[in-house]
Amino acid sequence: MSSFIQSITKIALVFILSSGLVAYSYSYVPQTIQEAQRSIRNGEIKPIQIVEYYINQIETQHDKLQAWVSIDKDIARKEALRQEKLLEQGIDPGPLTGIPMGIKDNVDAKGWK
């Protein structure tokens, strides 16, 4: 495992996805990337559930922390659901499948502030 992945596993997952349309239980939320990878592949949790949890956390804390410049909930939701479908078909696109990620505002991303 790369040192990058090892160092990231020590950081609690932070994510950019949400859908106010579906209510999920947050009784279990992986605390590391390794735990999330294992839980997603074992079917204990779905990528959309992780995304929903972290969007809820972002929305709850945004006024206080002002940590996010932009959040594209639609893209995040669609990507989480796309990854779920791939996994259900037995396709595993890679080790970060289903893992939400935030992009630092000093990284240029087309169409984003």
Image (cartoon, rainbow, N blue to C red):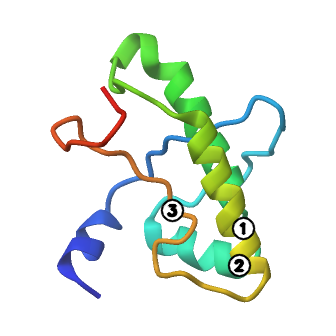
Q: Earlier in the sequence, mark 2 or mark 3?
A: 2
Q: CA distance from mark 2 to mark 1?
A: 5 Å
Q: Are marks 2 and 1 in contact (CB under 8 Å)?
A: yes
Relative to 112, residue 90 above or below: below
Task: Note whether residue 25 is visible.
Answer: yes
Q: Amino acid at mark 2?
A: Leu
**Quadrant containing the C terminus in the rendered view:** top left
Which residue, as the protein is rendered here, is positioned at the far front?
110
What amino acid type should be assigned to the residue bearing mark 3?
A: Ile
Image x and y of residue 20, in percent: 76, 29
- The secondary element bearing badge 2 is classed as helix
Label 1: which secondary element:
helix
Q: Which residue is mark 2?
A: 87
Q: CA distance from mark 1 to mark 3?
A: 11 Å
Residue at the (71%, 58%) spot, across then down: 81
Q: Residue furthest right?
A: 22
x 39%, y 12%: residue:
64
Q: Secondary structure at mark 3?
A: loop
- Tell me if I can see residue 44 in this picture: no
15 with respect to 45 (left or right): left
Pointer 1: what residue? 84
- CB contact under 8 Å: marks 2 and 3: no
Asked whether 50 or 79 is in front, the reply is 79
Which residue matches tag 3? Answer: 99
Residue depicted at x 65% and y 67%: 83
